[in-house]
Amino acid sequence: MKFLKNASVVVLSALAWSASAHWLHAQNVDAATLLKPPANSWPSYHGDYTGQRHSKLTQITPKNVGNLTLAWAFQTQHTATIKSTPILVDGILYFTIPDNVWAVDARSGHQLWHYTYPPNKGDHIGQRGVAIYKDWLFFRSPDAHLISLNAKDGTVRWNVEVADVNKGYWATEAPMIVGNHVIVGTGGDLDNLPTFIKSFDPETGKMQWEWNVTPPSGTPGGSTGGTTWMSGTYDPDLNLIYWGTGNPTPVLAGKTRPGDDLYTCSIVALNPDTGKLVWGFSASPHDTHDWDAVEIPVLVDGMFHGKQHKMLMQASRNGYFFVLDRTNGKSLLTTTFGPTNWALGLDKDGRPIPNPAKEPAPDGRIIAPDEGGMTNFRSPSFDPKTGLFIVDAHPSWSIYFSKPADGDYGWAGGDYGLWGKGVIEAIDYQTGKIRWSHELGEEGSGAGVLTTDSGLIFTGDAHGNFLALDTTNGKTLWHAGSGAGIASSPITYELDGKQYLLTSGGGVLFAWKLPDAVH
């Protein structure tokens, strides 16, 4: 057994070391790998920069998916649910829960190393995963630090504070690598707490730039908030990163922050080399319902109403589906994808117009969707063959209250859910119409979505089942129980000529493949 100097790293066992000796060469993940990931990798949170979560692998098909068998399972031995998307490089999977990073052999499920971050005061609500560049991993801690680890053994290279946990900041997202930039956001929902996106040097940890979501605290009529706690996407041709921002604060009380509260609840485009804002689109102007617009901005190149466009699509928490021209942020299509009653209509720029009568009030207002939103952090997928945007939706209703005793600060009210359910929806991006839907149950769901070129959708339901659906109609083709809640997004990869499906439930990672006789 090899002992490491860092006591917070669980050392490699002799068995795992022997089984994975082939891996000990440098990872050396470069820009080319991140731009065009090979089939035997999943090197970033979304798999690639587009956020489409679509795989070109076709070994697992609608005809043989029913034969999937368990290749291996890895138990974290922790009570925390896996909410991260594992990344895969050189046959090694890296995944997380709060305060923990594992390296696991993707062929066997054998643990290679385990890093544990020291106890801290951060919010341990979840952790989305890591990023990799060259031989280095980048990990966000619950107390809003950015840590660089050696990918070979999990030892710490450097640790920098992104935001002060004592002020109420926290972090959950997987960092994003663009060129020589490690780009991160932050979380936090307290009044007078500005939020931002920052870029750091991957070699030294030195901050390169910072973009603030809102004006400086104290600006007349200005709001704070706008948390940036999910990873963005990137267009290398335009050299723009796209990021979603969260709700303004105070959360349910809007009278102290009149206007649109830019750039909260928005989709923004930034230059990754400078952090300069190129354009912003307000998905929920003057939000008073806690509807973050941090949902994944999915990038698609293709025809829209007869013309070629570089598009950005988002199914937003507020119940609206947006298609934007990502060169300039102009609206191509805005429509709802479930019951939505809080807006008067759309303005000339395709933005919802908030209805003042639907703001929280002391006697309550019935609102659709609920505070959790029509969708949330779980990743959607775009299937380029069918033109379908597949999203885990949550049609729902709730009662919103303002509470005078709370004053104009903090949450400043309450939300009480009335009803909701989980539905996988297939949205035709040309029209915004729902082509088909697949019911998941009244308990809702927490699973993300993956599509493949063979015509499959992989996701999970409200009862802890992994599902394979037919992309053309949403019919169930395969399912397997996880025994626990599902809160992550599946990935797929190919090693040694075999396609693997990777899912997670509770604190267990599951790898599936076809029996040798089938393929």
Image (tube, grey):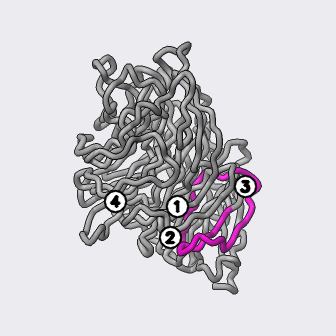
* Of labels 3 and 1, the one closer to you: 3
Image coordinates for residue 476, horizontal then vertical, percent: 66, 71
Over which residues does the magenta segment extend?
A: 466-494
C-alpha gap between disc 4 and disc 3: 40 Å
Q: Which class describes the residues within 10 Å of circle 1: few (<14), some (14-19), or many (20+)? A: many
Image coordinates for residue 25, horizontal then vertical, percent: 49, 61
C-alpha gap between disc 2 and disc 3: 31 Å
Image coordinates for residue 87, horizontal then vertical, percent: 52, 57
Q: Which class describes the residues within 10 Å of circle 4: few (<14), some (14-19), or many (20+)? A: some
Name the residue at the right extreme.
483
Q: Callout 1, which amino acid? A: Leu
Q: Earlier in the sequence, mark 3 or mark 1?
A: 1
* Of labels 4 and 3, the one closer to you: 3
Does the image show residue 25?
no
Q: Are marks 3 and 1 in contact (CB under 8 Å)?
A: no
The residue that mark 4 highlights is 31
C-alpha gap between disc 4 and disc 2: 16 Å
Image coordinates for residue 81, horizontal then vertical, percent: 67, 46
* Residue 359 or residue 490, whichever sits in front: 359
- Residue 183, quarter of picture: top left
Q: Callout 2, which amino acid? A: Asn
The residue that mark 3 highlights is 463
Q: Earlier in the sequence, mark 2 or mark 3?
A: 2
Q: Are marks 1 and 2 in contact (CB under 8 Å)?
A: yes
Of helix, strand and loop, which one carries label 2? loop
